Amino acid sequence: MRQAPVRSPLTYPRPNAPRAFREGVPELRAFPFQQWSQVAAHCARSTLRSAADYQEVAGYYPLREAIASHASITRGVHCQAEQVLLVPGAQSALDMAARLLLNPGELAWIEDPGYPGAQQALRNAGAQLAPIPVTSEGMNVEVGQKRYPQARLAYVTPSHQFPSSVTMHLAQRVALLQWANQANAWILEDDYDSDYRFSGRPLDALQGLDTAQRVIYIGTFSKVLFPALRIGYLIVPLQLISPFTNLCSCTHTHVPILEQLILEAFIAKGYFLRHIRHMREIYAARRAILVELLQRELGDLVEIQPPQAGLHLLCWLPPEMDDQRMSQRAGAHGLEVIPLSKLALGLPQRGGLVLGYGAVNEQEIQAGVHQLAHVLHS
């Protein structure tokens, strides 16, 4: 019998100019395309010929070395280049990890509210979703241990929780690692945009605290470079290198080699870190003006907690206000906002709107807030 196609809850934006407040998209107008093109031309002329045959399933080794070095220096990740596997984006990494680590019917902790792509990947693997509430300290590990102690996996975004923007406190991180070790469970750490932290250096990853080899770390270049690049990566425990490599060989052979060559050279020449520093300044300024304008025009109606990292914030609505209805009305006025209830597995106690500020400049943010204030006040 032919199975019904899998429906995805993800709504990827169409390739057009972003509107306020599209979430999950970086500022592409500030990307150094000229430098990228120069590096690409050099790689095509001098390196591609020697790499034109089939390549290692896990990816171009110099790029894996560069990623291991970057993750170690900036995120406190402990790994060797052999533990880095390149995949076609973070969603592919989530799908592979869920299928490899879970049997159908097994329980998986997942943040509630949380990232719909992770929800779908776990569902596609046949997992039973175990929603764990998110507090100001991140995923509530104590609730998970009480309700679902027999779970086999936990999915978390500890550095910058999606969509609440909270950072998981150290006590919760330690508790999660202890549970995984005792329960012989796995942790999927999705570190999707932690390069953009606005106060102090980026926080060390959960993987760096893991002494029992229970954490699978997932990273992507979609937010720090551009989404169409389609290069993500997994950093897996030593005992999982072979199973994950075998699965890669069954799914995509390897990520396109020219893009890998360009990215490795882009990192080696220092362009990558320079771009991150430049964009961090831009996003910090946009976050500041968005927070200021929301407080000025909607401070009597909404609540916000200025995020310490990332490209979005969560705007809490009054309890009596329907966030999905407000999202639809905002859409009719040319805005793109995500209702919090759409990201929840249960019914949230209060509605909210996720506002992205990465892809829109200060003038567009100002116009967007003014329009949003009109929608909510009316």
Image (tube, rainbow, N blue to C red):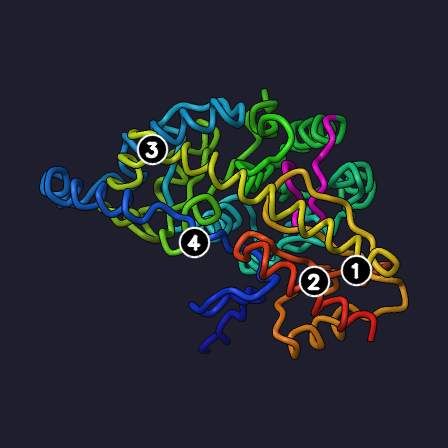
Measure the alpha-carbon separation of dots 4 and 2.
21 Å
Please state if 192 lies on the left or on the right of 82 as rendered: right
Residue type, label 3:
Ile
Q: Is residue 206 magenta?
A: no
Which disc number belongs to residue 28? 4
Q: Earlier in the sequence, mark 3 or mark 2?
A: 3
Q: Earlier in the sequence, mark 1 or mark 3?
A: 3
Which disc number belongs to residue 114? none
Instruction: Indicate the quadrant where residue 174 lies.
Output: top right
Measure the alpha-carbon separation of dots 1 and 3.
42 Å
Residue at the far front: name it.
363
Q: Earlier in the sequence, mark 4 or mark 2?
A: 4
- Mark 1 = which residue? 297
Q: Are marks 1 and 3 in contact (CB under 8 Å)?
A: no
Measure the alpha-carbon separation of dots 3 and 2.
36 Å
Question: Residue at coordinates 66% horizontally, 55% vertically from top-left?
Answer: 128
- Magenta residues? 158-170
Residue type, label 2:
Val
- Quadrant for the C terminus in the image: bottom right
Nearer to me, 343 or 325 = 325
Q: Are marks 1 and 2 in contact (CB under 8 Å)?
A: yes
Q: Nearer the viewer, mark 1 or mark 3?
A: 1
Q: Secondary structure at mark 3?
A: helix
Q: Position of residue 163 (x, y in %)?
A: 68, 51
Nearer to me, 144 or 49 = 49
The vertical placement of 71 against 189, above or below, is: above
- Mark 2 = which residue? 369
